[in-house]
Amino acid sequence: MVLGGLLAGAAYPALAEVMDSSPRPVPRPASGAAKPAAAAGASAGEYAALIAAAKLGGEVSFVVADAKTGEVLASRDPDLALPPASVAKAVTALYALDRLGPAYRFTTRVLATGPVEAGMVQGDLILAGGGDPTLQTDQLGDLVARLAKSGVRGATGRFLYWDGALPRLRGISADQPDHVGYNAAISGLNLNFNRVHFEWKRSGGDWQVAVDARGERFVPEVGMVRVAIASREAPLFTYDAGEVEEWTVASGALGKGGSRWLPVRDPGAYVAEVFRTLARAQGIRLDPPTRTGALPAASELGRVESEPLPDVLRDMLRFSTNLTAECVGLTASGATELEASARGMSDWVRNAFGVAADLRDHSGLGGASRITAAGMVKILLAAEAGKRGLKPILRSVGMKDDAGAVIEGHPVKVLAKSGTLNFVSGLAGYVAPPSGRDLVFAIFTGDPERRDAVPVALREEPEGARAWTKRARRLQGQLVNRWAGAFG
């Protein structure tokens, strides 16, 4: 039952987060007079009752303000610093747009240190990454096919790969289990969100397993990651890093068959191996790949470009992809260490918006980052006033009734970014009622001490976390409900 969720394959590391309850407007008074701002959509006692009913423990902080004037309409502990979780990605999007510009594209290039004569590169052939977090196997396969069509058949020298455009990191946060794909490794070369596809099937008394880097049209096998089925009930996974990354999976949890994406901890070597396999299939013979620490003088034979930055960021916000957040943040800062890069972004927030934030990464995955609800609202207000490009790429949060059904054509529109860690939940964005004033809000709820007490091995889904998150999201919906009704 556990692996029914844990071992499910998906095109992205995480599904988008949505509200669990519908923020429907509360009827206005019969007189039609608007409630005064002091009423704040609910009395202090009503807010306290909602929070008590959520049974979250820890802290709850929120601010809602008029989107045009910045007037604060309601708040609770607005200056309390809490973990933003993935709400931090909204800040990262603003940072990347400012530092890189909306026309920016990531590039992955194939280079040659000599001319191509009779189909052979007279020198080394180099796969050079540009930090693209969105590169997929099919794009790499198409790049190889273009090289083959141009007449390339191999190289007289070495096959090198360069992944130094970004720092090489085994994971974003050290306080996460090895097997979780959302704690992605990072390098200047990335593929399939730095995951391999592991598939298993029961065959008689034995198991058939396959590990590949599958796309829609190309399914190259992968040799640098091996997965063995171990006859045991627990632990669910073991992992051993090395030139070949070795995994074992407990047979007692597998059933008859299934699949899962597993993280790769040396993505540069992974991309190079897949490229060589795809090249061999197209008749291009290359030596085993060797990492190079610096790019030599070389000419370009081909390239893959990402979508423009706003499209990359839109998908990052929609699917909450941690790898994308870290790659765009590191690219924007130019720092060689993640913590230094996050400090650079925090400094930028202070200079651009006058907000003190203590961000330790660009994705919000680490639990040590802190920001206040008042600070987040100030950032969102300034971003919209300055037309910085955030609002058009935020996802529309679907409204649901109390039974969980989507309400089609709901009059209240919410563009927001949610965030979830164990016993931490946030939601921040914009509310557009059918009439009245547009709103900006931020809600942070968290029990960091309870989160930190969970052993690392159990942090994928600790006991009680799912129910806690559901209650937190329901509270968020109830708050937005009252604000939309009172002020819209």
Image (cartoon, rainbow, N blue to C red):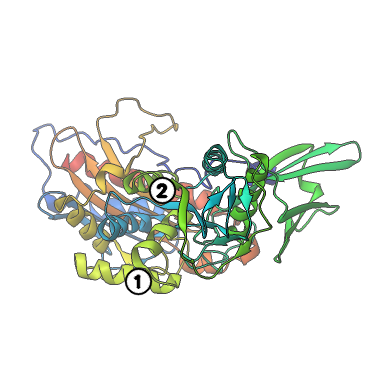
Residue position marked by numbered label 1 in the rendering: 358
x 20%, y 60%: residue: 378
Task: Tell me where residue 173 appears, x and y as whole percent.
Answer: 52, 66
Question: Do residues under tags 2 and 1 come within 8 Å of each other at their CB atoms?
Answer: no
Q: Earlier in the sequence, mark 2 or mark 1?
A: 2
Q: Which residue is situated farthest in the top direction here?
A: 408
Q: Residue furthest front?
A: 118
Of residue 383 and residue 223, the one placed in the foreground of this image is 223
Q: Is residue 35 above or below residue 232?
A: above
Name which quarter of the figure residue 315 lies in.
top left
Secondary structure beneath dot 1 equals loop
* Left or right relative to 35: residue 213: right
- Vertical placement of residue 201 versus 60, above or below: above
**Amino acid at dot 2:** Met
> Is residue 55 in sight in this rendering?
no
3D distance between C-alphas at marks 2 and 1: 21 Å
Query: Which three-letter amino acid code belongs to the residue tagged 1?
Result: Asp
